[in-house]
Amino acid sequence: MKTYYVLPMLFLFNFTYSQQVDLINENFDSGIPANWTHCSTNWGTSPVWAVDSGALKEASGWYFVATSNMFTLPAVDLTLISNPFLEFDLAMAITDTNIQLSVWWTNDTTCNKVWDTINNQWLLDSSWTLLSSYGSSTSGAANIISTDTSFNNNWTPLSTDYQMISIDLSPFANDSNIRFGLSSDYLNYGASGVWYVDNVKVSGISVGQTSQIDCSKLSVTDIVINNTNLTIDISIYNGDTNNINYPYIGLVVDNNGDTIQNGSINFFLHAALDTQTYSYSLADTVSAASPYTIYFAYSDMVGSADTCILNYTTTPDFCDSMNVTFIELDTTGNPHLIDFEIETFYTSSHLFGYCGFILLNNMGDTIAYENISTAANVFGIGPTTTEIRTLDVTQNLALPFSGTIYLIEGWFAGNPGTQCSFPFNISSGTTGIEEPPMKAKKLLLITDLLGRTTHPTPNILLFYLYDDGSVEKRIQLER
């Protein structure tokens, strides 16, 4: 039975949207601008934040008392724009106890502090007002974000560690002289950590300038339906040089005419020349048929709205045209080996480049992996292929075994990413002779691809070094 939703806003035409104006747009590639200042409860106006790895870094702690070290942006006139917002990229790692990043505002230009006689510490004076804060679930911050952990203050974030923070500045829209500041907050004695901030913007929409959106410059790049988590993700590229205000996916209709998603506004802005993913919940599992029709809606929030009707056809699922068959568990050597056959039945030219395999049990533990030192083929798997692959077993394997084997593109070279997964079962019979259990080896350290010491981190390729000289390459997959 087909289900239809009618959204009146989808059929209001003559929508206008405005050009984004950046009052501040700083990536720190040329250092800290001269008109950016510092204000610290301990160090006054002395610089504490410094440019490192193309971003602002702060890792001066720990301190004997709670301490805030702030860098302040130049004053801006928000009356020049509408729908103002503050945006920046943030990465944090906790070394010890509680830290957070706070955002402040003021109409003052001074850096004054007062002594807290109750807690015996310096505080920013009342000219600064707290706007928001970000930290881990134990920090007490108003906004909970993902944070890493670090053994010392030398932590450097990966690109995936950064999170984009966007703050609506509409309450200050009539303020013609306002300053914002970002502070690293050591919340108690002994607290320490690392902060990185990059791509700081204060932006908005130019007042009185409007133009018609060109729907031909929008394209759907991906649709992912997850019937397990009941979610749908629609990625759209804005090929225009203008930003789109208050965008959302109104409807997604499949080739059978079934409405599989209807949504509402969930973004403040879709930036120009950028891809943005719109995520929505599904009421129930769906069996959608490609191609899809996507009704992309947007509004300037003053009564005008419009819709672009976009189309998307899914690419073939090459994983469905592959077969994995267990051959043998060989326990005669060290390490034990698992041989299996991989067959591909698709005829297109698609190649899973430099791919390898890892085997996980039903608890998500890595049981075996393909070793680059012994792999027969490290270049990839293509169409109409049949070959035997071998995995090194990394821990005791209880039979019968049931788990999942993952095809990781870029396992032997490049950026590893999971492409396919297949159920994998081993019965109680083996072809080799069971050896006595070996003495457990001791883990010495864990490093990343650059050789930096780290700790177990989901979805990142890591190397485990043991006291017997062996090295294991692992990826712990989490959704």
Image (tube, rainbow, N blue to C red):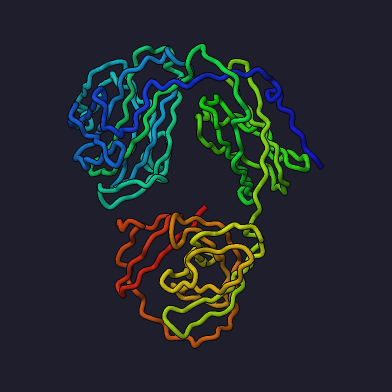
Residue at (53%, 36%) from the top-left corner?
276
Which residue is situated farthest in the bottom direction here?
433
> Quadrant where the N terminus lies?
top right
Q: Position of residue 109 (x, y in %)?
A: 25, 17
Residue 444 is left or right of residue 18, and the answer is left
Q: Is residue 268 visible to us here?
A: no
**Closer to the camera in the image, 95 or 49:** 49
Which residue is situated farthest in the right direction here?
1
For residue 328, what is the image quadrant?
A: bottom right
**Closer to the camera in the image, 403 or 471:** 471
Residue 355 vertical position relative to residue 162 in the rendered view, above or below: below
Which residue is situated farthest in the front direction here?
349
Q: Position of residue 247 (x, y in %)?
A: 58, 28
Residue 241 is left or right of residue 112, and the answer is right
Residue 2 vertical position relative to residue 228 in the rendered view, above or below: above
Residue at (63%, 21%) from the top-left corner?
305
* Image mark count: 0
Residue 208 is left or right of residue 447, and the answer is right
Residue at (68%, 42%) from the top-left corner?
283
For residue 346, what is the image quadrant?
A: bottom right
Residue at (21%, 29%) from the top-left corner?
122
Q: Position of residue 68 (x, y in %)?
A: 26, 32
Q: Is residue 440 visible to us here?
A: yes
Residue 304 vertical position relative to residue 51 in the rendered view, above or below: above
Q: Position of residue 175 (x, y in %)?
A: 39, 13
